[in-house]
Amino acid sequence: MNRVWLICVLTVVFAAAVTLVGVQSGGLAAPITGLGSSKAQEKVKYYEVRGTTLDELRQDVFTRGPFDRNKGHRFAGWAEWRIQWWFDSREVPQGCAVDNAVTETHIEYTLPRWVDEAAAEPELRDSWRRFVDALMLHEEGHGRLARELAERIEFAINSLPPEPTCEELARKVNELANHLIREDETQEAYDRETGHGETQGAAFPSIVVRASSTTATAATAGE
């Protein structure tokens, strides 16, 4: 049995309460140990906003919020996920076959943290808390869909037929995984169904904005 240390990564970025706003593609090859079941890692990072009125909050969000260089916009919330995959191979009469494929999904959420909250009026504080809770709920939905996609990728790789060489098998694995990511429409459908988070309550007066969508590009295998 040979272990194929081939990992490809496609990173997708979502802005809160908007449609798909940015895609980066790339790949890497590196040894990773501990092959087993599919894994997922999530973390949340915050950017600080200040103010005691709605106008001050709005201004600070669009000064400090996550910035999409492709579109030139800032947003209140952000979700970014990255899927990695690798596999073991084994010799078979037909050549080289997948022995065990594993995926790992890395998800990072970016949310605002209001540092002057205690000095604001109770009504504004309540509105903000509801907004941030709903914002996180919406972003976690994007994360869940990314994990589900990773599981489909893992299943599809494990189902591939043998190839004459392990090099050809590795190429087919990457083609398949990248194709599944590029063709996945669940993230966009989720935003349509939730009104980009608005039906979940992720709408704060004059803060949530919309952006036009972009199309995912193919990742380069094995870089």
Image (cartoon, rainbow, N blue to C red):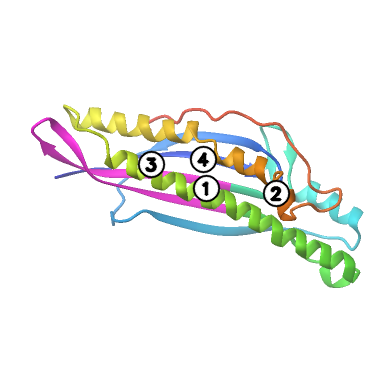
215 is within the stretch colored magenta: no
Three-letter code for the amino acid on which mark 3 is drawn: Ile
First-in-chain label (4 vs 1): 4
First-in-chain label (4 vs 2): 4
First-in-chain label (4 vs 3): 4
Residue farthest toward the left in the current orientation of the protein: 93
First-in-chain label (2 vs 3): 3
Please rate how many residues cluster around mark 3, counting C-alpha atoms within 10 Å: few if below 14, some from 14 to 19, many from 20: many
Q: Kindly check if marks 3 and 1 are in contact, taking CB atoms under 8 A apart as contact.
A: no
**Which numbered dot is residue 11?**
4
Residue sitting at 38 percent across and 41 percent down?
Answer: 153
Instruction: Find numbered disc 1 in the image and state the secondary structure of the residue it sits on.
Output: helix
Instruction: Find numbered disc 3 in the image and state the secondary structure of the residue it sits on.
Output: helix
Q: 115 or 191: nearer the eye?
A: 191
* Residue for badge 3: 153
Residue farthest toward the front in the current orientation of the protein: 193
Q: Specify the segment rendered in magenta.
A: 80-108
**Which numbered dot is residue 197?**
2
